[in-house]
Image (cartoon, rainbow, N blue to C red):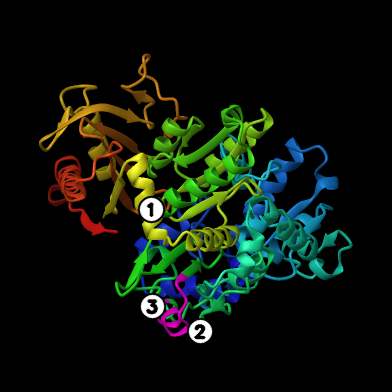
Amino acid sequence: MTGVYRSNPQTWKQMESLVREGRVVELRRRLCSRMTFGTAGLRAEMGAGFACINDLTVIQSTQGMYKYLAKYVPDLKTRGLVVGFDTRAQTSSGCTSERLARLTAAVMLCKDVPVYLFSTYVPTPFVVYWHNGAQISSPHDKEILRCIEESSEPWPESWNEDLVESSLLRRDPLEDVSRWYMEELNTICFHRELNAMSPLKFVHSSFHGVGHNYVQRAFQQFGFPPPIPVPEQKDPDPDFSTVRCPNPEEGESVLELSLRLAEREEARIVVATDPDADRLAVAEQNDNCGWKVFTGNELAALLGWWMLFNWKEAHPDPADTERVYMLATTVSSKILKAFARIEGFHFEETLPGFKWIGNRIHELKKTGKEVIFSFEESIGFLCGNMVLDKDGVSTAAVVAEMAAYLHTKNLSLKQQLINIYEIYGYHISRTCYVICNDPPTIHKIFSRLRNFGGPGVYPESCGDYCITHIRDVTTGYDSSQPDKKCVLPLSRNSQMVTFTFQNGIVATLRTSGTEPKIKCYTEFCAAPGERDISSLEEDLRKVTAALVEEFLEPDKNNLLRRSV
């Protein structure tokens, strides 16, 4: 290990410091476990140790990937590998996304595998994953992890970053992919002439990440002038110096610079991409009423309506709707299910994580089906199917076009959202979570749920509310199915139980794939015509509180409560 860490003096210093300070627990955390595939690939903090992202673990992971690909992809040395990077970095460990990308490329190049390494930072959607363009899922992930464990000793040439400049097998796909991507945007742009005449102004924040240039070009491809950039946030900054948290999902508190600029510029809509530009937040200025920051579920209602509206305009024959699909992760709003029930298209749920959505889109396309919209509640959206991942760049342009169209009808985004709820039923959601740093406690909590009324007997009620169905994707149980078996794939490595209540509330308790959290998602799915919003919100609040108190028992289990 000494020789390996001395290849990067910064990580070596980190380890020396931890040893010198006697931080045994932290050393054990970093050195006695490895990164694993979660809901979105191998993810961890940057820093020294096998459980973190650093030069060594990236080299090991890439060597494992090479070993797996060499075995299962016969034409690997013809097809090659695409490598992209964003702008994140950690000075103390010497880790930058670009350096890690170059090391990834070096591992493949030293094995004579062609590498398409982008010459500059790009949005995540520019980089495809598996050969089908979707993220890696089971069983590939487990096999790749096994190969990584068998490839822990770095090959001598794996450290040779100079191969990126010297190898004839290295190519830069930036120009081609950028052109193809912008051309492909035409498939989800429906009103270019209208866009060019729109009086609406837009502000965009790239949150110190990669999104600025690409969102500017996407707006122009749709016929709009470029959006007004937030000057303090448009250029990459790995320290994210103007925000307390580089996550636009956090709402108005992290969008402050964007909202103030929009007010000065008299821009009605703010769009904000996260640092790698695969997620999107949207805010709208309401007349004399401040700002409305839309949740992921609310934006999905608007975007789902918009994509269906334009599909129907282009395909007036009702028979065409039979091949239309929309997808959402199971912890997301059921609003698309309500659309499908009334409009006659197909809706499907997937496990959490866009890897499941991307792979399902690929399967459906092979059978002649067309997925026109997909989303996850954490502001991840895909309009159409031009890429098989969530995409903040294309969605930003789609939101602008939708807002411009609605403006010609004297409607705001918020007003249209109310119209949607009037037709398809109000869908009101809440999200909260508890922090638990003790895995045995998490196991005990979910084991209690599965044996609540005796061995193998789940709860029949929560608070004053009756539970009608329970689905447990960890064990494969679903009380709503005739054979009591889940339609969704098993997810044995995480805990996830969904409760459907008699009053229309759907609630899910699940463990996070990347953080020590138990998340609670609740939604009231009201029938069309039910308009007593305050009553719906009160029932949802009571059920959410009862779920946390009765099923998670925060005080008894020493859990920290958090709301979102």
Q: What residue type is labelled 3?
A: Glu
Percent x, y of residue 545: 16, 48
Residue named by callout 1? 417
As measured in the structure, the alpha-carbon distance from the residue carrying label 2 to the one carrying label 1 is: 31 Å
Instruction: Tell me the element at label 1.
Output: helix
411 shown above or below 257: above
Residue 559 placement, left or right of 3: left
Q: Which amino acid does label 1 sit on?
A: Leu
Name the residue located 71 percent from the left edge and 42 percent from the top edge: 131
Percent x, y of residue 440: 28, 43
Residue named by callout 3? 256
- Residue 260 lies in the magenta-colored region: yes
| Type of secondary structure dominating the magenta stretch | helix
- Residue 37 lies in the magenta-colored region: no
Q: Provide the residue span drawn in magenta.
A: 259-269
Specify few, some or many for label 1: CA neighbours under 10 Å numbering under 14, 14-19, or 20 or more. Answer: many
Q: Which of marks 1 and 3 is nearer the N terminus?
A: 3
Instruction: Indicate which label's residue lies in the foreground, 1 or 3.
Output: 1
515 shown above or below 55: above
Q: What residue type is labelled 2?
A: Glu
Percent x, y of residue 550: 14, 41
Q: Is residue 38 something that shows in the picture?
A: no
Residue named by callout 2? 232
